[in-house]
Structures are given as C-alpha cells and as structure tokens.
Amino acid sequence: MATLEEQIKSIEDEIQRTPYNKATQHHIGKLKAKIARLKEELEARRIRSGGGGRTYAVRKSGNATVGLVGFPSVGKSTLLNAITEATSEVGEYDFTTLDVIPGALDHRGAKIQILDMPGLIRGASKGRGRGREVLSVARSCDLILLMIDVFETNIEVLAEELRLGGIRLNERAADVVFSKATRGGLTVNATVALTKLDIGMVKDICREWGHLNGTVVVRDDVSEDELIDVLAGNRVYMPSRAVLNKIDLVGADYLAALQAKLPAWPILPISATRGVGLERLKDEIYDALRFMRVFLKPQGKEADLAEPLIVKDASSVGMVIDAIHREWRRRFRYANIWGPTAMFPGQRVGLEHTLRDSDVLTVVLRKS
C-alpha cells in the first residue's frame, strides 16, 4: 500500500498533468481537497511520532506581535536593532540569526513586540532550514513583515512558503458554516450566487473531508481553495506588509524599476543601516495592527487623557478589562462610557459592548 507521501506525490503529479478548465474543474477540486486532507494527516502523524524536533519558545508581550520574515542576510537583525532596544547579532553571511530574537517597539503609545526570525528559504514548509519552527512562530504573530532587499526580491517565494504553512496574508476567512448531522446527507444553502463552484462540487469537497451529513451555509462566492481552508480549520489570517531594505545601495532609477516589477506588493523602501524610511515603517506597522485608544476614567475622578490604553480596533469592554487585569472579568458589575459609542454620556453597558477609538471607560467592580 502506498505511503501518505507517495499518495500526495501521485495526486500532485495528476494535478500538474491535468489542464484546468471548466470540464476538469470538478475533478481538480476533489483532488485538491484530497491532497489537503492527506497533508493534514501526514502532519498529525509527524507530531504524534515526536517529529516536531526543536521548537522556538517565544513569550508574547506588548499590545501586538510583529514577525520579520525574509531570506537570510536581507537585514532583519539590523532592522530589529534599529527600531527596538534589542541586540541581535548581525553578520555579512547567511543564517546569522539561529534563534528568534524579540525586541520592543514603543510607538504612538503602543508597545509592539518585534520578532527577528531565522531566514526562510524555499522548502521551509517541508522542514528545510528549520522552516517548520519559523512558520510555527509566524502563525502566532499579529502582523508579518515580508522583508526583501534590492538584490533578492523574490517575495512570492516567501509568501508561498507561508501559505503552505497555513498562513493567509491580507485575506479573510470565507463565510462558510458547517453544521453536522447524523443522517440525511448533505444540504448546501447558498445566500449568494456561486460562480466559482457549483453545489455538487461543494458537496464533494465536504465529503472528501468526511462530512457526509449536515448543512453547509455558504455566504461568500468561494473558490475550492477557500472552501478547503474552511474545512481544514487550522488556517490563520493576518495582515502583511512588504519591506525593501538596502535602498542606499542602488540609484533612484533602479529602485523605481524594482518597485514596478512588484505591483501586487506595495513596497515600503528602507535602509536599516542608514535609518532611511524607518519612521514611515513604524507608522505603517501601527496602522496595519489597527489599534485604537481607550481612555480610562476611575469612578468619581477625571479621565486620564494623557496615557490611553492601546487595544485592538473594535474591542469589546470585556476584551479591554482582560487587557487591564485578568481578575476584573470575574468581579465585573458594569461599565460606563462616554464618547463615540455612547448613546448618552455615562451610558451603562456590559461586557459585550463594542468600543471605538477615543471612547472613555469607567469599570465598576464587585468587592473581592
């Protein structure tokens, strides 16, 4: 009987041999679903057998975590040292960084953890160059900076290795919900017109993942890959920005031509060694993380407008008090709010109330 690796290779070869058109779409969709399921099974076996090997243990801190992902020697360590207080070893040769080095960026009131990770290479998702460990850390980040330099610009290799590692950059999960049942077969309810898949293909892909009975509600015009991602259930979605380093080594014409070759990736040009473009980069990091400010007002006192609490955009009252103190949720009675989301000054709200930038918040707790 063929091994999982042999089955995967056989299906990959068949997909490569099969021209993609309307007549073959259904068949290729089923093959993609099968190969994704087999890869999930292979990874689960590797973990169960202790094949995980060494891992990078990184304790998250601050308001958010940003991962520097790039090829070896593109300047990740130099950038980390330039924008944080960290000291990461810098050298003019590949694989200077052999561990994950954290640093802290303080910008516009936010404390942002920056992680300098070992260089990523082609085949990282299959374990080359400690790729699996790097991808594991990347999955825990809130923002990925894809870092290239003016001499190594193949950013698509980095993006593809992250995709193979289950990381979706600048995407959102498709709105598809599956409700299991014990009998009755599969029912597909689509609330939008499906132009990329037909109902039969949705059912076949779901069956390939072992979903034989239940209801699938599809609220997006999904592709087979997006549906497979939903069924896999282990994809992570996060924003990303592309950083082009060492611009001090080339002329303006070269730089303009280089940026024109990468239309899919708006580039942030910098020179980490010369400090060029770093303030704009810090602003882009802050904006991409979608922070907002919440001002705290102790009961009977004035609001502290000098030092806002920095939280993620659209955070609820419950999320804010979790950020303040882990015990506050247990003792929570109610909150009063002033500002953009208040229907009237001092409105009383509960844990689920969604806040906006510049809201003022008073939290009332039960006595411990």
Image (tube, rainbow, N blue to C red):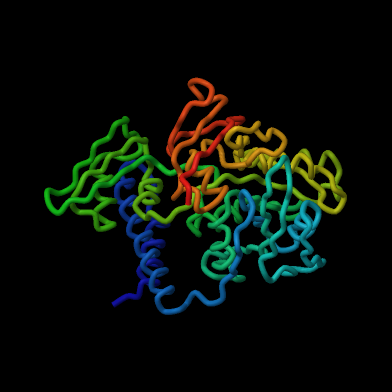
User: Which image quadrant for residue 182?
Assistant: bottom left
Task: Please tell me how many numbered marks the rendered image carries.
Answer: 0
> Is 10 situated above or below 114?
below
Residue 192, by quadrant, is top left
The location of residue 42, given as percent across then percent down, is: 39, 70
Q: Residue at x 43, y 73 (%)?
A: 47
Q: Is residue 77 left or right of residue 274?
A: left
Q: Residue at x 54, y 47 (%)?
A: 238
| Residue 112 in the image: above or below residue 350 | below
Q: Nearer the viewer, residue 315 or 284?
A: 315
User: What residue lies at 19% left-to-right and 47% top-to-bottom?
Assistant: 186
Residue 222, position as x, y percentages in the image: 37, 40
Which quadrant does the N terminus fall into? bottom left
Q: Nearer the viewer, residue 51 or 151?
A: 51
Residue 91 lies, in percent from the top left, at 81, 67
- Percent position of residue 108, x then y: 72, 40
Residue 174: image quadrant is: top left
Q: Is residue 158 left or right of residue 306?
A: left
Q: 137 or 30: nearer the eye? A: 137
Q: Is residue 100 above or below residue 297?
A: below
Look at 31% across and 38% down and name the residue there: 218
Q: Residue reaching furthest top? A: 344
